[in-house]
Amino acid sequence: MSDWAPGGWLSGVRHVYSPNFGERPDSGDVSLIVVHNISLPPDHFGGPWVEQFFTNQLDPQAHPYFAQIAPLQVSAHFFVRRDGTVIQFVGCDQRAWHAGRSTWSGRENCNDFSVGIELEGSDFQAYPAEQYAALGALIEALRQRYPITEIAGHCHVAPERKTDPGPFFDWAELARRYPDLILPAEISF
């Protein structure tokens, strides 16, 4: 999973192209990974809903919750399903629309300098080993191509608005695995 095509498209994963992206102010400035969680409808896994959401094809009539979010234009670079399947929506040389109003390490607009990875999950249950394995492979691949120095959660870059990846995400294991990366300060062993 470490070969890259032009534009920051990772080989060995499925590509589903989202229209929700923009140019990075500095394409060489990709130093942060932001970890998220998403499930559509909330707390339900599987199905086509996340792919449809990130490609502006979500049917607002398919579920009551979808009427609220269908008009939004959002994306992430990667989506990792519960079984570890990885889908890429935006080339990593581009800016995906995942973090919104955000700040990290004194810098605003985290979308400008980050890669967004959405884990299929919620704040209310643990993530399976398959997802952690796929996340680890993504982190390794990203570090081979970009000068990644930090990893944070959506809850860290937008703390007043977001809670993901939630309390069940194993930050301590990530810190043990990547001792050279800067992670959120509240992580303890």
Image: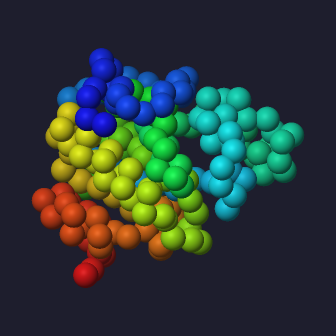
Figure quadrant of residue 67: top right
Based on the displayed image, in which of its 4 quarters is residue 39 positioned? Answer: bottom right
Q: Is residue 1 above or below residue 170?
A: above
Location of residue 69 in the rendering, given as x and y in whole percent from the top left corner: 71, 44
Residue 12, relative to residue 140: is it above or below? Answer: above
- Considering the image in quadrants, where does the C terminus appear? bottom left
Q: Residue at x 13, y 59 (%)?
A: 180
In the displayed orientation, state which residue is furthest to the left.
180
Is residue 19 visible from the viewing direction of this image? yes
Q: Quadrant of the N terminus?
A: top left
Number of numbered tags placed on the structure image: 0
Quarter of the view holding residue 29:
top left
Q: Is residue 168 toward the left or the right of residue 111 in the image?
A: right
Position of residue 42 measured from the top left corner of the image (x, y, whole percent): 69, 58
* Residue 118 in sight: no
Residue in view at x 63 percent, y 42 percent? 50
Colour scheme used in the picture? rainbow
Q: Which residue lies furthest to the bottom in this view?
A: 189
Horizontal relation, residue 128 to residue 115: left or right: right
146 on left or right of 167 = left
Q: Where is residue 131 in the image (x, y as percent from the top left)?
A: 44, 56
Judge from the rendering whether residue 69 lies leftward or rightward of residue 60; answer left or right.
Answer: left
- Give how far across and how far down residue 156 sits, in percent: 39, 62
The residue at 20%/29% (across/down) is 28
Of 153 and 119, which appears nearest the observer?
Answer: 119
Looking at the image, which residue sits at the far top? 6
The residue lying at 26 percent from left, 40 percent from top is: 142
Q: Nearer the viewer, residue 162 or 91?
A: 91
